[in-house]
Amino acid sequence: MDTAELMDIALALVDCEALPADSAIYVPGEAIRRVLFGLDIGAGELVMARQLGYDAVIAHHPVGVPHQAWRVFEKHVDLLMGAGVPEDAARAAVAPKLEALRVEGQIRNYEQVPLAARWLGMPFLNVHCPLDELGRRVMQRVVDDVLARDPDAPLGAVADALANLPEAQRAQTEVCVLLGAAGDRAGKVVVAHGAYTNGGYHVARAYFDHGVDTVIYIHLSPADLQCLREHADGQLIVTGHIVGDAFGIAPYIRALRNAGLEVDVLSDVLDPGFESGQEA
Ligand SMILES: [Fe+2]
Ligand SMILES: [Fe+2]
């Protein structure tokens, strides 16, 4: 298998045809049988992979494309509009953080880790948005099932349904209700994930202002949480970063193994075969 096929397996899981701006093949390679996967890959992990005899390394988080990855944040506009937010309000909600991410993307040394991979001759790619979109669908399905069984389900029941998934069970963090009380009615719930990073204050606020009762993020800055507490009227659940990412990563690991690859995952939380042994 080659690095393009490793990427294509991820894209196919969400019927995505074009490579998103936050995912990239940094060092192409072929005849790949043994793969190391990690949430964050740096030069150290690449050296480790070489020493341990892997043929390729896959990261989730983008390391070499910060100057373009911010564009994926615009996907929040589609998610907002899908939940009934008018386009002008959706674009206004996305604009401040989109600009911040664009400016921040100019700061980073986008070459550092890809250069290490190139000098090591280690095939290396990162797959971000497709796996987060996969995770978003998994989470939204779980939430929708809870609400289909009981349209008046409380926030605590929604949080528990996510917390009971195997990925969350393996993690040390907890699924948290950050705004609202566990006994409050969850109402209309949107999982706002799969658009580079969390939408922060403005995106959550736009959902709340347009009929969404509960927003689910995988993480949120303390400053944004404070702003929401002071200026917004809505409910918020946060899954925890590694858990939220694991919901989309675990099915990808499974698909790679089903394609015949030997895949080791740095994290037990992200590895769907951790408890049952290495599954086929
Ligand atoms: Fe992610
Ligand atoms: Fe992440």
Image (spheres, rainbow, N blue to C red):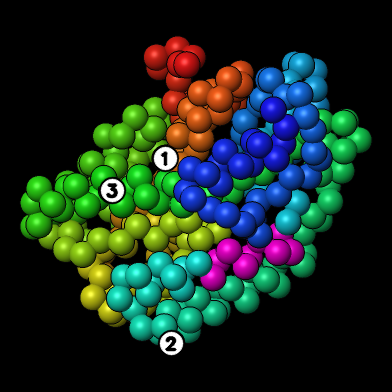
Residue drawn at x 80%, y 38% is 28
What whole-number distance in Å separates the C-alpha atoms at marks 3 and 1? 12 Å
Point out residue 67 in the picture as x, y percentages from the top left corner.
Answer: 74, 64
| 152 vs 254: above or below | below
* Amino acid type of the residue tagged 1 in the rendering: Phe
Which numbered tag is attached to residue 88? 2
Q: Residue furthest right?
A: 119
Q: Is residue 35 magenta?
A: no
In the foreground, 121 or 11: 11
Point out residue 149 in the picture as x, y percentages from the top left corner.
Answer: 10, 48
Residue drawn at x 74%, y 45% is 25
Residue drawn at x 73%, y 21% is 54
What whole-number distance in Å separates the C-alpha atoms at marks 3 and 2? 28 Å
Point out residue 271 in the picture as x, y percentages from the top left corner.
Answer: 49, 26
Q: Is residue 138 left or right of residue 159?
A: right
Q: Mark 3 points at which residue?
A: 141
Name which quarter of the figure residue 211 lies in. bottom left
Q: What segment carries the magenta color?
A: 66-74
What whole-number distance in Å separates the C-alpha atoms at marks 1 and 2? 31 Å
Q: Mark 1 points at which residue?
A: 247
> Is the C-beta separation of discs 3 and 1 under 8 Å?
no
Mark 1 closeness class: few <14, some 14–19, many ≥20 residues within 10 Å: many
* Amino acid type of the residue tagged 2 in the rendering: Asp
Disc 1, SS:
helix
Residue drawn at x 25%, y 61% is 189
Q: Residue furthest bottom?
A: 88
Mark 3 closeness class: few <14, some 14–19, many ≥20 residues within 10 Å: few
Q: Mark 3 CB in 8 Å range of ligand 1?
A: no
Q: Residue furthest top?
A: 277
In the foreground, 114 or 27: 27
